[in-house]
Image: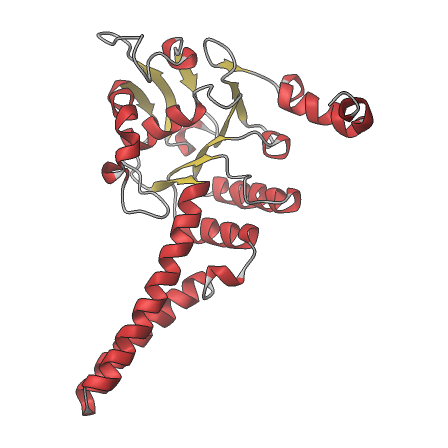
Amino acid sequence: MKFSNIPLRQISIDLNDTDINEYPFSVNTIRGFKTLDVNKNVTLLVGENGSGKSTFLEALSIHLDLPVIGRSSLSDDDTLDNVRPLSDKLRLVWNRKVRNGFFMRTEDFFNFSIKLKEKQEDFDKLAKEYDETLTGYGRDLAMGTTLAQKNALNNKYKGNLDNMSHGEAFLHLFSERISRAGIYILDEPEAPLSPSRQLTLISIIKEASKNGCQFIIATHSPILLAFPEANIYSFDELTPKKVFFDDIEHVNLTRDFLNDPKSFLRHL
């Protein structure tokens, strides 16, 4: 894919005038961060929990001012207050600046499912209230408008996401929200997905990439890490390091375990 098709080319962190002993700058990969080339449609981040992947993605999402699945903005998320200083230190190199995209964590997906159900219930309550308190044309107009809004919501998200499995609902929501070329940041999207649905996610991302979408994804999944021609960076080093699929510890451990599970389990 040509650079011109990809919005964001490079990310670096300016550590001047920062206290590297204070979080999040005290995280090894943040303190040692130099430059991350994101010059492909898909960039994957791999590493142990606590290695700084999520911290980096949260800071990047704040810097890009991306909307979040399940809430209106990261600006009102006080759980990210300690990450905001890092977002101010990010330096981006663009091929073409875009404002489209979103940030999605597993917890955001579950929050969205809850809010969608609450919104549908609110429409039902409002329609019932209009039915009981209004008459004639005013009643018909108010109820019609309310039920039309509910139907539009149902049509977009296939009714209540609770009627689907977590994997089905996640993939449906994800594909519905990718509307046009932009930057989509995903933190461990494999959590609600079975192996077969992870392959479906890869298919969705591949198709969106053809339309100029760019994805930056933190994952532990060997399936997602096998995404064709993706950049892969390990956050298990002092400085995030570009790695190949067959050299990733997650991949090799999973492969070895599946080849001979008994040799692992008998030592537990």
Q: Nearer the viewer, residue 9 or 184?
A: 184
In the picture as drawn, the residue positioned furthest to the bottom comes out as 136
Q: Nearer the viewer, residue 220 or 176?
A: 220
In the picture, which quadrant includes the C terminus? top right
**Can you tell which quarter of the image residue 95 is in?**
top left
Q: Position of residue 137 (x, y in %)?
A: 19, 89
Position of residue 74 in the picture relative to residue 69 (left or right):
left
In the rendered view, would you say 242 is above or below 194?
above
Look at 31% across and 22% down and name the residue there. Answer: 92
Count the numbered circles shown: 0
Look at 33% across and 74% down and name the residue there. Answer: 124
Q: Nearer the viewer, residue 60 or 23?
A: 23
Q: Position of residue 69 (x, y in %)?
A: 37, 46
Position of residue 17 in the picture relative to residue 215 (left or right):
left
**Can you tell which quarter of the image residue 225 is in?**
top right
Question: What is the basis of the colouring in this image?
Answer: secondary structure
In the rendered view, would you say 188 is above or below 253?
below
Q: Nearer the viewer, residue 96 or 264?
A: 264
Look at 34% across and 43% down and name the residue there. Answer: 68
Q: Can residue 97 be seen here?
A: no
In the rendered view, would you say 167 is above or below 162?
above
Q: Position of residue 9 (x, y in %)?
A: 39, 24
Q: Position of residue 159 (x, y in %)?
A: 45, 66
Q: Can residue 230 be seen here?
A: yes
Position of residue 180 in the picture relative to residue 229 (left or right):
left
Look at 45% across and 53% down and name the residue there. Answer: 173
